[in-house]
Amino acid sequence: MNATTVHNEKSSSAVEVRGVSKVFANGFRALDDINLTIEDGQFLSIVGPSGCGKSTLLQIVAGLTAGSGGQTLVGGKPVTKPQPRDIAVIFQDALLLPWKTTLQNVEFPLDLQGVSAAERHSRSLEMIDLVGLKEFADNYPAQLSGGMRQRVSIARGLAQNPRIILMDEPFGALDEQTRIRMGQELVRIWEKSRKTVLFITHSLTEAIFLSDVVVVMGRNPGRILERIPVPLERPRVTDMIGSDVFGQLRNRIWHLLSDSGDTSSPAQNL
Amino acid sequence: MSLRWQIRIGQILMVALFLGSWELATRADWIGIDLLAPVSTALVKLYEMLGDPAFLRDYGATAGRVAVAFAIGAPAALICGFAVGEWQDLEKISRPIINYALSIPQSIFLPIFILAFGIGAMQKIVFGITHLFFVTLVNTIAAVQSIPKDQVTALRSFGASRWQIYCRLYLPGMLPLVLTGLRLGMIFNILGVLLAEMYASQTGLGKAIFTWGESGDTVHLTAGLIAISVSTIAINGLMRAFERRAYRYQLETRSA
C-alpha cells in the first residue's frame, strides 16, 4: 500500500496522520508530509534510522509537540494537547517517580486526572498483577530491576485505560534477554486488551514479532518509505522468529533501510 | 551486640576521650588557663550564665538576628534559585555573577557593610542574609535542574497542568537538595552574624566572646564557646533530621 493513499482508508481508524510535517527552528526538516493510518485495535510499529523523525512523529500524535503542518486526528478529532483519557505514552526510560512505590506510580496519572481513590486503586492493582509485579506493589523504583521498572511504566500506561498506547522504544534501554522477554509479555498483554498501539523501535525482529503492520521510515527528510503488513498469525510465539516468512520480511525491511541511502548503522537495526 | 551498637559505643568513647583530654590538659596546666578553661569549670560557669540577664540578652540578640536573616534570606534565595533554575536564559546570564560571588570571601566586605548599615542589628542581619543567600541559591538552582526534562514530558502526557507539575514533581523532587541548601545556608548565616558581631557591635554572642577573649577571661570565653557550639550543633542536627526524612526513599533503597 502506498503511503500517499493511506488517508483514503475507511474511517474506523483510531489514529489518522494527514500530511504532517515538522521543521525545527534551525531549518532541519524532521518530518515531511507524513500520512499514516492506524486502525482500531491494530498494533503498528515504526522502524527507521536515528534522525528519521519517528520519535517526533510519536510526540506529535501524543499532543506533546505541535507539527509544522498537517493534522493528526485521534478518534476523528484533531490533537492539540495531551489526551490522557484516550492516549497513554510509554517512554524509553520508565520515568517513575523515585519517591513513589510501584502502586503509587501506577496510580499517579489517575490521581492527576481526579479519579477516585478506590477506583484508581483497583485499576492499578489489576494492571500491576497483569505485568506480574503483584509482590512488588509496595517497593520503590530503586529496588526494582530495569525490566521491572519498565513493566511498572507499562502498567501505568494500561491503568489509564486508554484506547491508544504510544510506545517510544520502550525496551531500548534494556539488555537483549530482558528485551525479548518483555516483547513476549507485551504480545500477551496486547492480545488480551486489544488496544491500538503505535510502537517505535530500532529492532526489526521486535517490530515484526509484535506488529500487524510495520511502517519503514527514511530520513533527510523524515518520510515513510513503505507500509508492510505482517502476515503471521496470532497468538505469536517466539518460534515464528525462525520461520521463512519472518526471515523474508526482515530481509525486505533491511533492504528498504539500506537502499534508502541510509548506511548509518544498518547492523544495529538487525 | 550488633555492629551498630558497637559503633555507637565507639562514638561515645571518642567524645569522652576528647572531653577527658581537654579536662586533663587544662588541669595539668599543659594548656594554661590563660588560653582555655577546663571543661568542667566552663560548664559550671555556663550553668551560672544561664541565669545571667546580660548573657541571655546577648544570646537572644544573636538568635533573633540569625532568625530574621534566615526568614528574609531563605525565601529570597529559594525564589531566585527557582527562577534561575527554571529559565535557562536567566541561568546563563546570572551564572558568572553567582560563581564570582561564591568565590570571593565575603568577610572582606564587612567594612563596607558597616559604612552602609552602621553597627546595629540591621548590619548583622544583612551580613547574615548575604552569607546565606548564595549557598542556598546555588543548591536551589541545582535542585531545579535535577528534575529530568523527560519526567516533565511524562507528566504532561498524563494530562498534568503546569501547577500539578510544580506541586507533584518539582516540589518533592527538589526537596532533599533544597533542605541541604537551607541547612548550609543556616550555617553560613550564623557565621556571618557572629563575624559581624565580633567585628563591631554593642550586643550579641560574637561581641561577648570577643570581649572575654580580649580581657583574658577564658572561663567565660570557654563557656560562651560551648554555648554557641551546642546551639549550632542542635540547629544543624534538627535540619539534618528533616533532610534525612526527605531522602528516606533513597535510604530505604540502600538498606534493601
Image (spheres, coloured by chain):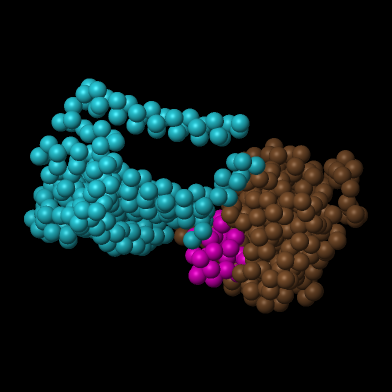
The residue lying toward the viewer, choosing from B61 and B37, is B37
Quadrant location, the C terminus of chain A: top right
Residue found at x 72% / y 66%: A121
Task: Give the x, y percent position of residue A44.
Answer: 76, 59
Residue found at x 57% / y 65%: B156
**Chain letter for the part of the structure drawn in brown:** A
Question: Which residues make up the magenta segment?
Answer: B150-170
Residue found at x 46% / y 60%: A25
**Chain letter for the part of the structure drawn in cyan:** B
Q: In the image, is A155 to the left or to the right of B75?
A: right
Q: Main secondary structure of the magenta part?
A: helix
Can you tell which quarter of the image residue B229 is in? top left
Residue A251: in magenta span = no
Residue found at x 88% / y 40%: A242
In the image, residue B178 above or below residue B164: above
Q: Is residue A61 visible?
A: no
The residue most toward the left is B115
Q: Is residue B54 visible?
A: yes
Q: In the image, is B162 to the left or to the right of B108?
A: right
Residue B162: in magenta span = yes
The residue lying toward the viewer, choosing from B92 and B190, is B190
Task: Give the x, y percent position of residue B218.
Answer: 18, 37
Quadrant location, the N terminus of chain A: bottom right
In the image, residue B211 above or below residue B86: above
